[in-house]
Image: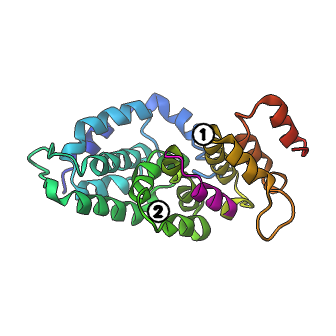
Amino acid sequence: MKTPSALYEKMLAAANPAEVPGLMRFFKTGPGQYGEGDKFLGIKTPVTRSVVKECWRITRFEELEECICSEYHEVRLAALLTLVEIFKHAKRPPIWSEGTSYPASTGHLLQQRCIDFYLSHTEYINNWDLVDLSCYPLLGEWLLSAEDRSLLYNLARDGKTIWEQRIGIVSTMTFVRHGQFSDTFAIADILLHHQHDLIHKAVGWLLREAGKRNQAALEAYLRHSQPDRKSPRYKEMPRTMLRYAIEKFPEPERQRFLWGKA
């Protein structure tokens, strides 16, 4: 029988059964809910991060495979956060433990391997925290200097699940933090009429982040219509999406948008 990785073993050791019921409610694991059937160990995210900090240097990809496929939500999160750390440090001087030994010269190839691993395991990235804590430190950073960002558009448009579609929009957070808003606005257009509340919240969140950095750009986006429509976007988007998007606006202006008088 295969011996579990140190990452997996330490996550199992951190289990707190008393926290399980609350986490199951919070992540909507009941019948018909978006997290239906997911299992939890009762580990909160700061604890998972501390385990990852301890283990990421000695974790190999075959061990990440074991963790990302786990039935336990927190172990999958640990795999994703470990992947983020490997990606982030790939081009830095070799600080790996002897058991891992990733050569510094393979930095770009190692980052590519992280991205390939991520995209080939999206079926296990199946809740909003797993998406939001991993996609933009990986895909967003990977595509920041790329001319072709169609991968994110394809995920938003053709994603097999709401989680792949959410990856498409949330990955643009990295661009927003670098003052680049066009992809966020364009992918928001793809998802503007989506039916799921979790997509409404994600799109509204990214629009709000863009508006915090350039309110005029967000206002222009909201006030103009999509190319094939006549009404301004703010009148067409779901109410939750709009509320998230304009949350940081001055109150009088926020009310004008909410009442359709912007």
The residue to which callout 1 is attached is 213
Whether residue 14 is visible to the viewer of this picture, yes or no, is: no
- Amino acid at dot 2: Glu
Residue in the picture at 64% in, 56% down? 185
Q: Is residue 161 magenta?
A: no
Q: Is residue 186 magenta?
A: yes
Image spot of residue 208 (x, y percent): 65, 42
Q: Earlier in the sequence, mark 1 or mark 2?
A: 2
Observer-nearest of 104 and 219: 219
Q: Secondary structure at mark 2?
A: helix
Instruction: Quadrant for residue 117, please give it.
Output: bottom left
Q: Secondary structure at mark 1?
A: helix
Tell me the magenta residue range: 178-189
Q: Main secondary structure of the magenta part?
A: helix
Residue in the picture at 23% in, 51% down? 91
Image spot of residue 19 (x, y percent): 48, 30
Residue in the picture at 40% in, 31% down? 46
Image spot of residue 29 (x, y percent): 58, 47
- Compared to residue 26, the image places residue 91 above or below, namely below
- Looking at the picture, the colour scheme in use is rainbow
* Neighbour tally class for label 2: few under 14, some 14-19, many 20 plus, Cα within 10 Å: some
Q: CA distance from mark 1 to mark 2?
A: 33 Å
- Amino acid at dot 1: Arg
Whether residue 103 is visible to the viewer of this picture, yes or no, is: yes
The residue to which callout 2 is attached is 123
Image quarter (top left, top right, bottom left or bottom right) of the C terminus: top right
Observer-nearest of 44 and 192: 192
Observer-nearest of 193 and 232: 232
- Compared to residue 153, the image places residue 28 above or below, namely above
